[in-house]
Image (cartoon, grey):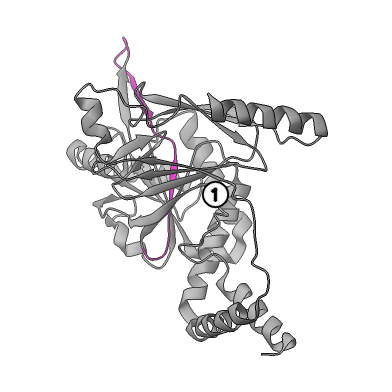
Amino acid sequence: MNGRLWKAVVGTALAACAGPAGAATPSFKAGVFDPPRLAPEFVLQGSQGQPLDLNRYRGKVVLLAFGYSSCTAVCPITLNTFAQARRMLGARADGVQVVYVTVDPERDTPARLKKFLGSFDPTFVGGTGTEQQLEQVRKEYGVSATKTTYENKSYSYDHSSFTYLIDRSGRIRALMPYGHGPDDFVHDLSILLKECLMRRGTRIVVAIVGASAVALTAIAMTPIRSASREQVFEIPKGTWAHRMAGEPIAILPDHIHLTAGLRDILVLRNRDDVPQIFGPTLMMPGQSFTLPFDRPAQYVFACTAHASGQMTIVVDAYPGDPWARIVWRARALRRALW
């Protein structure tokens, strides 16, 4: 294959196939699941006057979040962020559906949810039901909701505030923690929307890429090498059973140190035969969770695989100058030895 033809094939393939499911390098702003699992099905009372069946939105990218209409802080910010992201997407927003499931069935009737969600975007749909129905949905998605009742008999909920990103095939691809702005949602939604378009009409291109890859391998003289930005930890089988038996477990360190711009992607792999909780997410057996960090900070996450029940992530600043690199290497060596 001559050089010009190869460049044309690769250029076309990369333009069409950017970001397919299972890509080796995570490019999402959100945490990524690998492999992605099918989003658990549910049917609830819908805010649009008909049952809310999650499967109805196959073919669209779904933003799935949980909250309630009486929330005065987190929920309005989340919904306003969704609305801004849809406006920024322009015509592509037709491929995105926001689904909002209440944690407050006592007050959130379908009519109230419709009015509440419509104040942000008329395309948003909400779901409500009995407490038992909603509890089951929360359980399947690893969502918590704790009710606090006050002396005047009013009440509020402390609930999970993350957002699931579900692709057009109905798989949970990523989890966006609370606090990300509309730009990050537009970034990740664009990946999923483009990816779905690729699956529709590029089988021939993918076949060409596969054949061309064989030719490229044959003529390649020097392998491409790049330092991994991933810090990988595995939760082995039997972890939960050992912890429940009161046996000491030392699988994960108390502090995990990452470096922004150098090694800033945390990968957790659940090899146990029971689900494990890490931060706001529920990892199923055999599932991995990939979470990128883009700024120096310290984070404390709940972690059922750690003896203390929590784990601290320390993201150090990139060692830009010579002295900073010396200090960084010395600290890395000390952590490796002790």
| Percent of width and height locating residue 319 | 74, 34
Vertical relation: 275 (above or below) 42: above
Q: Residue at x 40, y 48 (%)?
A: 288
Query: Left or right: where does residue 223 sit relative to residue 59?
Result: right
At label 1, the amino acid type is: Ala
| Percent of width and height locating residue 280 | 41, 35
Per the image, the residue denoted by label 1 is 83
Q: Residue at x 53, y 57 (%)?
A: 189
Vertical relation: 207 (above or below) 262: below
Q: Residue at x 46, y 35 (%)?
A: 75
Residues in magenta, as a range: 150-169
Mark 1 secondary-structure assignment: helix
Q: Quadrant of residue 265?
A: top right
Q: Nearer the viewer, residue 160 or 216?
A: 216
Q: Residue at x 40, y 68 (%)?
A: 59
Q: Is residue 159 magenta?
A: yes
| Percent of width and height locating residue 235 | 35, 39
Q: Nearer the viewer, residue 181 or 149?
A: 181
Location of the N terminus by quadrant is bottom right
Instruction: Give the mark count.
Output: 1
Query: Left or right: where does residue 215 sit relative to residue 113?
Result: right
Query: Left or right: where does residue 24 sit relative to residue 149?
Result: right
Vertical relation: 12 (above or below) 124: below
Q: Is residue 270 magenta?
A: no
| Percent of width and height locating residue 34 | 41, 54
Q: Nearer the viewer, residue 60 or 219?
A: 219
Q: Quadrant of residue 67?
A: top left
